[in-house]
Image (cartoon, rainbow, N blue to C red):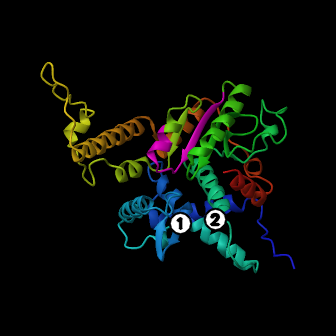
Amino acid sequence: MAAKKLVLPKAWYLDTVERLVREALPELLGQLAAGTAWRYVYALVIWTELKEGVRYLHLNDRLSSEAGKQLAARGERYLLANLAKSPVMEIEPLIDHVGKAYEALRRDQGITGPWQRNNVTGAALETAVQALINEICGVLPTRSPDLRKLRGFELAPRGYHSRPDLILFSAQDFRVLLSTKWTLRKERLGTFLHEAYFYRQRRSDLQVAFVVNEFNLSVLEWLLEDPLVDRVYHVHKPMLMKIHEPFAAGTSVSAQALLADGRTPKPAPPKGESRTQEPRATMNVDARQRQEVKDYQRWLNVRERLFDLSDLFADVEILKAAGAKGATRDEAVPEDEASIAAEKAAES
């Protein structure tokens, strides 16, 4: 007997997110505004994952490694202190609200067993950004539109590229392509950038931006430096910078040396003599210091070039002032949300 299939009503994600944003979450998180929208994204989307009997915040895809677990622990400490209106002792009651609503919908339809978290995460993040732009800026982006119905893409090859995550704003007033990614795997960046190139080749005036929750600075730096990408917005840039703060856990090299890029020259040997081989222990320290300098330079580069989610709302207001109009509610949501979510998850 075939397993019972979930029936997901049209606009279920948007209806669910709007209800949570307007009714349930303000009491927990405080009033919604551009500066507090990050709280709503995390409350809606983020979840914990069980690893070796311990629950870790899913900030990254590396929870099998000790470094990934430590990063998740630092992130959880930050959220315990900052996510709610006042510090809390437990994170679970504050987070995964879309996931919990999805699980309740499954129960209501008599469906049991595991479900694909990636599908729900991708759809929840897309819809969270879509709904928050509408709540804060008063214009509704279009989610997962049919590529061939967008102005300038009517003759695009069928199946050549997947649906965009979000566009600002409607199919006929299509100015910005907004790709939303909870995490970014470096091996997938080439695909995302190839898609950006495809869009730009057909519409040179199109702006390409990303909204991400990636916490790997190396991956973020890679994306930030690509000329095809106009903006990269992080769900909460202050949290990213804080949990990677160079001097928070101490380093083997002084802050002064890092600020000087670690370029203190070594004295030259006397004329006629060669530089002596350094003891291995000293060489290991130097290698560690060079890595710390490199990490610090990356942290500075990301801090300088990365935008915060609050900047997205300011940019949307600029587009509004230039005459951009939002999509209608019927245009703004896909017809078959379950199939599209599964399709995107398979590609990511």
> At 56% across and 28% down in the image, what residue appears?
227
- Residue 211 lies left or right of residue 330; in this view the side is left
Q: Which residue is mark 1?
A: 47
Question: Up-down: is 32 above or below 84?
Answer: above
> At 60% across and 29% down in the image, what residue appears?
322
> At 21% across and 30% down in the image, what residue appears?
264
- Residue 116 lies left or right of residue 69; in this view the side is right
Whole-percent x and y of residue 163? 74, 45
Residue 216 colored magenta?
yes
Question: Up-down: is 139 above or below 97?
Answer: above
Q: Counting other residues with Cα less than 10 Å from the Cα at mark 1, is it few (<14), some (14-19), or many (20 or more)?
A: many
Whole-percent x and y of residue 5? 80, 71
Question: Up-down: is 343 above or below 81?
Answer: above
Type of residue at label 1? Trp
- Residue 51 lies left or right of residue 190; in this view the side is left
Q: Is residue 137 visible?
A: no
Q: Secondary structure at mark 2?
A: helix
Q: Which residue is mark 2?
A: 117
Seen as rendered, the residue at the extreme right is: 1
The CA span between labels 2 and 1 is 10 Å
Residues 60 and 213: in front is: 60
Residues 215 and 149: in front is: 215
Type of residue at label 2? Arg
User: Is there CB contact under 8 Å for labels 2 and 1?
Assistant: yes
User: Which residue range is magenta in the image?
Assistant: 206-221
